[in-house]
Image: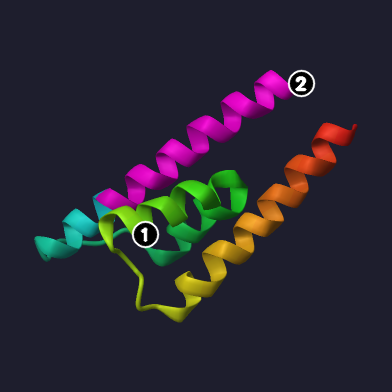
Amino acid sequence: MPSILFLYLLIVNILSFGIMGHDKQLAKTKKRRVPEARLFFYAAIGGALGAWLGMRTYRHKTKHASFVYGIPALFVVNAACVYLLLQL
């Protein structure tokens, strides 16, 4: 179980990081953006660390309070869920 969980978290965090970078590129080129709900969705399903690293790496969404506080809060929730799953 831990190896499947690790693989899942690795994939969802890579996706979350990549989507942040992709959305930043879309913002620079003034194209249709990734909906904020989708960014939060990936963070909520385990990709909060990737989203947070993407925010910092690409300097994206760093002035939006919902992201500045919401993504770290989701990371805490993600960490608690992982901890509880590993206790099973």
Q: Estimate how packed mark 2 is, as few (under 14), some (14 to 19) or many (20 or more) residues with alpha carbons within 10 Å.
A: few
Residue 87 lies in what quarter of the image? top right
Residue at (12, 63) in percent of width and height: 28
- Rendered position, 87 above or below 62: above
Residue at (39, 78) in percent of width and height: 64
Which kind of residue does numbered mark 1 sit on? Met
CA gap, disc 2 and disc 1: 30 Å
Quadrant that contains the C terminus: top right
Q: Estimate how packed mark 1 is, as few (under 14), some (14 to 19) or many (20 or more) residues with alpha carbons within 10 Å.
A: many
Q: Which residue is mark 1?
A: 55
Q: Which segment is the magenta one?
A: 1-21
Q: Is most of the magenta stretch helix, strand or loop?
A: helix
Which kind of residue does numbered mark 2 sit on? Met
Quadrant that contains the N terminus: top right
- Tell me the element at label 1: helix
Measured as percent of width and height from the top left, residue 69 is found at: 54, 73
Q: Which residue is mark 2?
A: 1
- Rendered position, 68 above or below 37: below
Residue at (44, 53) in percent of width and height: 51
